[in-house]
Image (cartoon, rainbow, N blue to C red):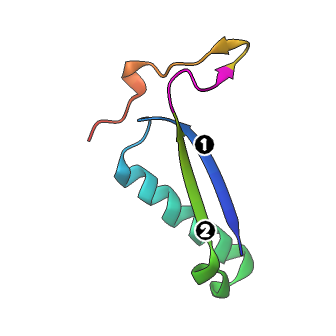
Amino acid sequence: MPFCNIKLPEAALSRAQKEQIIHRITDLFVEYMSEAARPHTMVLIEEVPDGGYGRADEVFVIPEAYRATG
């Protein structure tokens, strides 16, 4: 079973954008593995709350300008 796990900052993408990522990643697996992979492909998008991870030794909070609208 093809599996892809993506972690994103909470509220960084809209629901429609997450759906598009799921469809495109599924299509990518199908391109490499054949159409037989489609019904078995799992794409998991996990949203990490602000302050739940760090970068360059700093706790990360997504800037308001980068938050999804809608």
Instruction: Give the image location of residue 11, x and y in percent.
Output: 41, 35
Q: Earlier in the sequence, mark 1 or mark 2?
A: 1
Q: CA distance from mark 1 to mark 2?
A: 14 Å
Query: Is most of the magenta stretch helix, strand or loop?
Result: loop
Horizontal side, residue 61 vs residue 14: left or right:
right
**Residue at 61% over, 68% down:** 42
Residue hosting label 1: 7
Q: Answer whether residue 31 is magenta in the image.
A: no
Is residue 55 left or right of 65 when viewed as pictured? Answer: right
* Vertical order, 10 against 35 (above or below): above
Q: What residue is disc 2 on?
A: 42
Q: Secondary structure at mark 1?
A: strand
Few, some or many C-alpha atoms within 10 Å of disc 1 (few <14, some 14-19, many ≥20)?
Answer: few
Instruction: Using the image as rendered, state which of residue 49 and residue 20 is in the foreground.
Output: 49
Q: Amino acid at mark 2?
A: Met
Q: Which residues are magenta?
A: 49-54
